[in-house]
Image: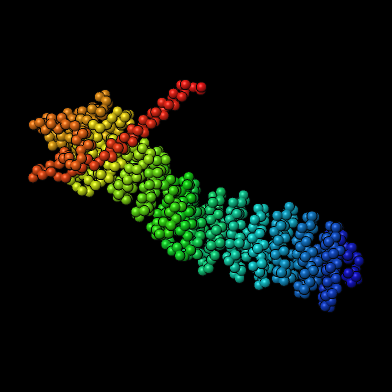
Amino acid sequence: MADAFSVIPASVLRNLSDKLYEKRKNAALEIEGIVKQLASSGDHEKISAVIKLLATEFTDSPQANHRKGGLIGLAAATVGLSSEAAQHLEQIVPPVLSSFSDQDSRVRYYACEALYNIAKVVRGDFIIFFNKIFDALCKLSADADANVQSAAHLLDRLVKDIVTESDQFSIEEFIPLLRERMNVLNPYVRQFLVGWITVLDSVPDIDMLGFLPDFLDGLFNMLSDSSREIRQQADSALSEFLLEIKNSPSVDYGRMAEILVQRAAALDEFTRLTAITWINEFVKLGGDQLFPYYADILGAILPCISDKEEKIRVVARETNEALRSIEANPTENFDVGGILSIARRQLDSEWEATRIEALHWISTLLTRHRAEVLCFLNDIFDTLLKALSDSSDELVLLVLDIHACIAQDPLHFRQLVVFLVHNFRIDHSLLERRGALIIRRLCVLLDAERVYRELSTILEGEADLDFACVMVQALNLILLTSSELSELRELLKQSLVNAAGKDLFVSLYASWCHSPMAIISLCLLAQTYQHACAVIQSLVEEDINAKFLVQLDKLIRLLETPVFAYLRLQLLEPRQYIWLLKALYGLLMLLPQQSSAFKVLRRRLKTVPSYSFGGGNLKRAASGNPHSQILHHSGSQITEDGDIDQDNGNLQSGINFASLQQFKQMQQQHHMLAKSRAQSRNSSTSILKEGPK
């Protein structure tokens, strides 16, 4: 230190700490001259002593004027060193950088000025301090003092110029600092950061694109900044990077995809639009690199399909179609299970469009990767069944298409029907609202006979008798009214003359026994009129209740529809269809006379031509007890109406109803259940009347 004092006159040191700027400036000029002479003589030891003196006695001084003088002195020493300043930068720059955080704004201002002058002299040699300088400038860009901000901006521009022309700049060392600073919310800092990103990206020798994943999230953060200027700058930078991505042969799509997926769910519309636009380009460009991220990408796209902003919806749909058009192999890191999980989750979305697209994805995966999807069936099956309760008819039909595709295998077919019946059992409203739609669609997709046979088998052993009755009535109504089941009706009409029709009739009969009205309807459809009479005459008081009469009313009205045109035409031949006529009269006798159904049926029966009642056939037929003859008959076959070959008079084999005792047995179970409930109600009523003892 003594050497420094001997080199620099005391008057110069006094002036260097003077409160007047002019005196400090003149002192600095003298120091510049002294250092220049020392440099020309090669006395770097004394130069080091001078710099140390300026740093310790001045820049570290508690007096603000001393610190100002020290800064201007260090800058002057650097100017004096000129081309030889590089070897002393380790002493010169740190004190200046420390002054950037000085409490006195004027000191911070002079620190900017000093480093500016130092940088002009040493240029690229001070790159070794770049990260520290950048960090200091980052803080000064948000300085509370406008003059300091202005000085920092001037210094910043010079540093940018130096960096862009330097071959010593290390992007690898800089990126961690940039990534850390990208989380700052201050608008001035954000402008500073975007400016640097833009400048560095413009340098051909600096590969900013390769490090884009490190600061991409920060740029997206800025898209929702309150400052329009910052939003525009961030958008401009992102647009430039996206253009570079399109033209680059090597891009790390994976890391960026993870960021974009998060940003696609941002609250800010502009951020969501930008993110989904990037994802759209990635799907087109990324190829197999994106296979491991398809599930996450789909999770971002599906909600955007229902976005309130139309531009986002359009891009999301385009992206979704592009993603679905790419056929990938599960062996190529294509995560079928992950995509199914996303689709299943989106089935709970409040937006119909999103739910529908989720189903389209499940359908697509079933078509392309059936074996893999079936491995995850247990994970999605319940959700698919719940979707049958959706408010959208379009969605329900699509769910049914998927169920039908799954049910191509016998095991899954059985599982589908069992689960479907289970859902109807626990949610009667589903049966009421969606039952007809679901059953009809499944009949189209999976063959009506197959569906009805399976349902009948399940309902035959149904423990909940009330539900079984309601379900059978619903199936019966669908059978009698739906155009999709016309072939099934035609087959049942041939039950007396066709083995396949007979087999189907017997299959349905077992479960139709849960409902007397369903059995009667089935017999009328299958033209087994004699058994219909037997069922009608076997009815007891418990059977003829309000629900039965409602079902009967529906049947009478159905008899007037085209479905039963054949039956009405058969009434033209009452001699040949005695049991049909008797069955209809039996139904008439069950109806209240004041009901509209009674009047409809009575008018129909009045139109039966009397000229056909020749001979005593009707009388003899009516005099017997069909119930006794049919339900209790064994060991022989009973001939049904119309079962006469007019050409040769030979009898055709009909159905042996002697073996069909299910109806009586099943109805007995229903009666016992009704009595048990009545007894329970009476018991409860008695207890309430008696009160506590």
**Residue 229 image offset from top left, x and y in percent:** 61, 53
Work out whether 573 lies above or below 358: above
Image quadrant assignment for residue 462: top left
- Which quadrant of the figure contains the N terminus? bottom right
Q: Is residue 39 visible?
A: yes
Q: Residue at x 38, y 50 (%)?
A: 415
Residue placed most toward the observer, 76 or 180: 180
In this orientation, which residue lies closer to the viewer: 640 or 349? 640
Q: Is residue 305 visible from the viewing direction of this image?
A: no
Q: Residue at x 32, y 47 (%)?
A: 454
Question: Which residue is drawn at the image coordinates 42% and 59% (left, top)?
Answer: 372
Does 132 sit left or right of 226 as displayed?
A: right
Q: Quadrant of residue 603?
A: top left
Query: Is 164 placed left or right of 609 in the picture?
Result: right
Residue 571 image position (x, y, % from top left): 16, 35
Q: Residue at x 41, y 40 (%)?
A: 427
Q: Nearer the viewer, residue 436 or 245?
A: 436
Tell me where residue 468 appears, x and y as whole percent.
Answer: 35, 39
Question: Outermost residue, bottom direction?
Answer: 41
**Up/down of 349 relative to 174, above or below:** above
Q: Quadrant of residue 628?
A: top left
Q: Position of residue 162 (x, y in %)?
A: 68, 68
